[in-house]
Amino acid sequence: MLMLGIETSCDDTAAAVVEDGCRVRASVATNQDAFHAKYGGIVPEIAGRQHVQLITATVEHALETAGITLEELDGIAVTRGPGLIGSLVVGVASGKALAYAASKPLYAVNHLHGHLYAAFLEQDVPPQLPMLGLIVSGGHTQLVDVRDHGDLRIIGRTLDDAAGEAFDKTARLLGLGFPGGPAMDRLAQRGDAAAIDFPRSMVGAESLDFSFSGLKTSARYFLESPAGKRANPADVAASFQAAVVDILVAKTAQAQRRLGHRTVVVAGGVAANSRLRAEMAAWAQSAGVRLLIPPLRFCTDNAAMIAAAAYYERRSAFPTSLSAARAVSPLKLGADPNLPF
Ligand code: KG4
Ligand code: ZN
């Protein structure tokens, strides 16, 4: 089964072709960082306009790379949210137009489900369900109990900042630019993770929720203090990163003990973090669970994960086309505030 994936939830214009929810025949993305960097963050208006410019060429590029035509596809998957509305609309409208023109079913995919399904890409043995998922991105930090395809329950979430947001904001204080996570990761390699004792909020609490704003504020106070002004930035980066990673690993371990699932997936942009990958691997080995962390190119936003999610969720998802969309109950459409159509 050949699925075209389209992802435009934030600032990457991405398209992919995935066979049977696993084999990536093409995955292309046009990064917009250069357009947003001088503003220190993503500017929604610019992101939407860039998607308009890039979407057609990106989809064409994916089909060409996969060596197939639109007619040969079995379905089209598009991110329906959550994300920036002006960005989502471009992908959704493009997916709908292509589905209509080629008479293919269109699958509307939740972006966060997509991040988890990145773990199914290029795997000879697909992850076994039920599984526990940790989604750590710029906008979200969630623990998800994946009982079945299409049956996902959020069992923990951040009460304030997302893990990626905490990285980005603290990186900014360190003058590392945007996005700050990867720069922080690189700087931390040269630092001492034990140099500063930043707080590990919520660790030890029974709740599976996260909180990063206290940690972020404590990093800010430290950097403004005389000791902080003297401190080696690499030590600050390493210590901050260690605190975030400790919180993520502790909560994941706690959730795994509670659910008893033997498969754990860590996904989303922050799953690219080298310390998180190493610490999670060490924990998984000691706990005897199968840990899957997608390769770096599938951790950050990409369209292959959207195509994979649509493949696995297609029975529970509602395939929609311009004609089928009318058959979907308005109540169902209205029930999801993130559904932009
Ligand atoms: O999943 P993603 O590409 O986009 C969202 O859906 O948000 O995640 C982007 C986030 C950013 O906050 C970025 O700083 C963070 O992932 N990130 C990292 C690393 N690579 C990306 N954070 C820490 N270490 C990294 N190596
Ligand atoms: Zn994402």
Image (cartoon, grey):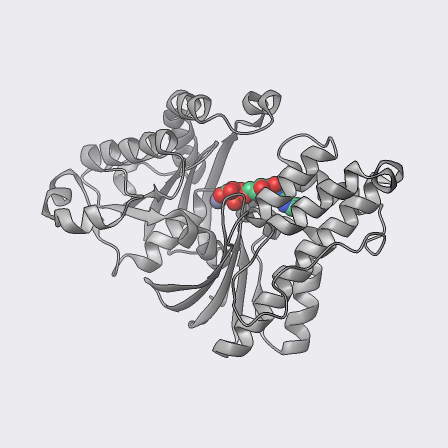
Residue 128 horizontal/vertical position (percent): 45, 71
| Residue furthest right as drawn | 230
Q: Which residue lies at the image location 41% right of the left edge and 33% below the top edge?
A: 64
Tell which quarter ligand 1 is in: top right
Closer to the camera, 141 or 285? 141
Taking 47 as reference, is 276 left or right? Answer: right
Taking 196 as reference, is 139 left or right? Answer: left
Residue 301 visible in image: no
Taking 143 as reference, is 212 left or right? Answer: right
Residue 286 horizontal/vertical position (percent): 68, 76
Residue 265 horizontal/vertical position (percent): 53, 63
Residue 156 visible in image: yes
Q: Which residue lies at the image location 31% right of the left edge and 43% below the top edge?
A: 338
Q: Which residue lies at the image location 64% right of the left edge and 61% below the top edge?
A: 247
Q: Quadrant of the C terminus?
A: top left
Q: In this view, does 110 lie above or below 228?
A: below
Question: How many labels sit on residues?
Answer: 0
Closer to the camera, 148 or 104? 148
Residue 276 horizontal/vertical position (percent): 67, 57
Taking 286 as reference, is 271 left or right? Answer: left
Q: Which residue lies at the image location 18% right of the left edge and 51% below the top edge?
A: 332
